Amino acid sequence: MKKFSTSGLPLLALALSLVPQAAMAQQAEPAPQAGDQDADYDDDFHNRSSEAGEIVVTASRSIRELDILAGTSVVEGLELQRNMDGQVGEILEDLPGVSGTGFTPGASRPILRGFGGERIRVLTDGVGTLDASNPSDDHAVSINPLTVERIEVLRGPAVLLYGSQAIGGAVNVIDKRIPLRLPEEPIHIDTLASYDTVNDEYRLAGSVDVPFANGFVFHFDGSYLDAGDLAIPGYALTEDLRADLLADAAEEEGEGEFEEAAELREQANARGTVPNTFVETTSVNGGLAFFRNGSTFGFGAGYYDTTYGVPENPAGGHHHHEGGGGGEPEEEEEGVSIGLEQFRADFRADIDLGSGFLDRMLTRVGYSDYTHTEFEGSEVGTVFDVTGFEGRAEFVQSPIGDLRGSFGGQFYIRDFAAVGEEAFVAPNTTEQFGLFALQELSLGNFQIEGSARYETTDARSNALGVDRNFDVLSGALGLSYDLGGLRVGVNGSRVGRAPAGEELFAEGPHVATGQYERGDVNLDVERAWGLEGFVRGNVGPATVNLTVFKSWFDDYIYLNNTGTFVDEEGIAVPADDEEAIPLFTYLQQDASYFGVEAEVSVPFIENDGFAVIGEASAEYVEAELDDGSPVPRIPPLGLSGALTATTGAFDVRGEVEWFGEQDDVPAFESTTDSFTFVNASIAWRPIRGDKNVTLLAKVENIFDQQGRRATSFTRDYVPLPGRNFSVSLRTSF
């Protein structure tokens, strides 16, 4: 096991030393029903809604509105069941401003406002996933959505709350590993079972919470997912890519290479399914929580294991050839797959500090031992080992008149090592320490929010003899005014991000993506000015949410397709060389982002026991580098509409989603055509007055239309799924 540097541990020691002291200082009072003291659970699925029906976001417990992150969404309950998938990035795609990388069904990270990778942090209850999913789209997120309770999406500069890798936003997953409430029943059981026809996917998950002794709760959960190859409408490859392969086949045939010509034609004409897109995932978690005197303490541990296929890129796949020359036939290449394992342990504390200046202390610590293995057939290609340790302590202030807020510190330590012939990133260590504060002042209908964060990062690779230090100061100021149910506001920010280890130290071929990646040890801090305006609230019976944002980046870091080719040693070769691999390099230049997100919900009918609600949303992002070229893989204009009819026992919903063409792309990146998906679902609650048993049937892409996701690296050969029938059963008792 790798050893950590201890330079970032003082904060942890401080936080943990305060835990018993704070607990001993409390006066006896009834045990809370949840870790979130402001929550009102309307069913056993623990939907966190205020008495006014507003969503309570975990990240904003220190302030009321969290206007400084104007685009905040929560997915839970029926919506979570309706959009359930094996990857977090796929679950959130129906939200405005949210897309997914969609590399393969086994690996899809969320993209917020066109930002992905190292600019979006995926968190588990405020602490990072501590995996290797950020630097490459083929790396799955080590979170199993089957056992989560809710997912919070924070668009905008979440760097202020969660660190520089959240410069574009954050996705905070609240799982069940550490119990968040004291069940009222002797034993509480949640289950989920589902089946999808499009890839013959089975999902099973269950959890149990058992209260015992005096305020203790034991938790256990497990899940299993198994899916075959993805079914698609039409050809797997784009027309341009098919034409290139068929031309290559004709050329091979003209040279007398008939077997190779036949293989190329078979590849070009593949349709109906995408080969090597299987997924198999297992997870097991356990936890123990203690509720006493208004405080909660908990510990959890879990194991996550997934194996998934990586579809071959016909346009620039990775080449391996057996045998030497002399005209000997080449052995058939075996498919690439990825095996991912993670052991994780977490500590959580929410401590009532009484009635003084400080109201609560929130502590979260996570440890992870993560291994990511890329297989070429049965042979091990590259092994990525990541050991991570992260913690944060946040002190929530007691309200002083109209002033609310919190402050705290956070540390992050990661040891990264890649072993194998294609270990394209040198071993490296990242240590990060940050201090932050978030304040809110209410002056009648007028509200001011401010936040600041200082962060220092040390990124070093002893193998390369490189040690880089970065200091980043970020801040934001938000102003808003309540017009009587309708809130308008403007936010300004100056934020920064230190380059990641993979951006600094990459040098070599990456088998899963079929590209040679070259970092730059001289990369500087990426900084951005941000400005956004928003309007949200009620206009008559309608609920509206509109956000317009603009960001100006200095020294924006991006992975650039050079249009040139190298061999496995990084030496330039012609494009037609049998060992040619496309060269991608990390570069910096200024960039700008502009976008719009809009949502409206209108109740057309509201009678006793029956309602019809219409919804519409729109999203648009454009991003351009300083040289005038577009930023790679930006989502196109998207429009959607839905109509939901609700009774006591049934929810019937119809949806139409339209995505425009994306032809504003950089050199060497393909365009995508527009497409429309129509979906429908019906949810049935068979037990009168009980929301805790729900049977859901859904059909997606009813008309079996082909679509390709502009944000996906694999869009040219992995289209979106075809028509899919699914059924799921969720219970809680």
Image (cartoon, helix red, strand yellow):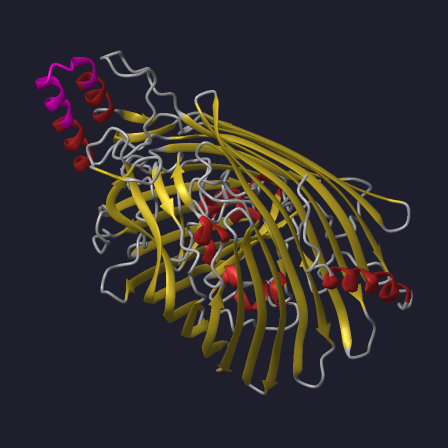
Q: How many marks?
A: 0
Q: Position of residue 409 (x, y in %)?
A: 67, 67
Q: Residue furthest bottom?
A: 443
User: Is 264 in the magenta?
Assistant: no
Question: Which of the pair 555/139 is nearer the observer?
Answer: 555
Q: Quadrant of the N terminus?
A: top right
User: Quadrant location of residue 627?
Assistant: bottom left
User: Vertical placement of 138 versus 629: above or below?
Assistant: above
Q: Position of residue 274 (x, y in %)?
A: 34, 28
Question: Which of the pair 163/481 is nearer the observer?
Answer: 163
Q: Position of residue 34 (x, y in %)?
A: 74, 56
- Residue at left 63%, top 74%? 437
User: Vertical placement of 648 versus 221: above or below?
Assistant: below
- Residue at left 17%, top 19%? 261
Q: Position of residue 594 (x, y in %)?
A: 33, 67
Q: Is residue 473 something that shows in the picture?
A: yes
Please tell me whether the stretch drawn in magenta is mainly helix, strand or loop: helix
- Residue at left 47%, top 59%? 499
Please report the bounds of the magenta region as a residue range.
Answer: 248-260
Question: Which of the pair 383/702 is nearer the observer?
Answer: 383
- Residue at left 12%, top 28%? 247
